[in-house]
Image: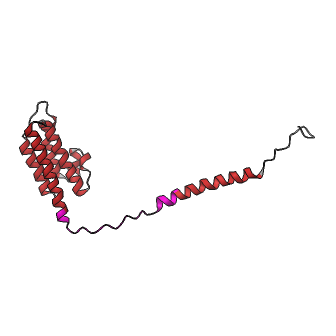
Amino acid sequence: MPGIDGYTPPASYAPIWTFLGIGILVLIAAWYLFIWWWSRRKHRMPPSTPTQNVLLEAGLLKNKYYDLIDEVEQSWRQGDLSTRAAHQKLGTLVRFFVFESSGRKAQVMTLEDLNQANLHSVADAVEQYYPAEFAAVEQGDLPSSAGIAREVVGTWN
């Protein structure tokens, strides 16, 4: 109903709506503060026990990769793997060995990246695998290539 001058006075709302709106804004601000605090908080890892024998762990890792190289060679000899697939697996094994032993992401590096990262022994091995991996006709000497992979694993420090 219009007022005296033809204008309608402003509607009055219950005070609960004001408090509810302020409460929602406070909850949103608290949520952002919580997220900020949680992301800034240092997540404490349990203290790791000092490695008693780093050489033993390195030896176990090398033995693991020697066994994997032997498996690739065995599969190739049995005819389960083609020469191309065997060379691809050797290249992958060498790259993952470097990743597991040093943390360097050699498994995603190109040949040029390997050379720029001073991973020359790995780069040389991968470069020798490329012709067998990408040739139109299957070629390559897998026992020799497996020996190269063993040499990279054996001489890695």
Q: From the viewer's side, name the closer residue of 109 and 57.
A: 57
Residue 90 spot, x, y in % from top left: 15, 45
The quarter of the picture where residue 31 lies is bottom right
51 lies above or below 111: below
The quarter of the picture where residue 104 lies is bottom left
Residue 17 spot, x, y in % from top left: 73, 50
Q: Residue at x 51, y 61 (%)?
A: 37
Asked whether the viewer can see residue 157, the reply is: no
Specify start and end residues of the magenta stretch as a single range: 35-56
Q: From the viewer's side, name the closer residue of 92 and 71.
A: 71
Q: Residue at x 17, y 59 (%)?
A: 60
Q: Residue at x 81, y 44 (%)?
A: 11
Answer with left or right where residue 19 lies relative to residue 47.
Answer: right
Q: Residue at x 17, y 44 (%)?
A: 91
Answer with left or right where residue 112 lies relative to residue 36.
Answer: left
Residue ranking furthest to the top: 136
Answer with left or right where residue 49 lies relative to residue 12.
Answer: left
Q: From the viewer's side, name the closer residue of 3 and 118.
A: 3
The quarter of the picture where residue 111 lies is top left
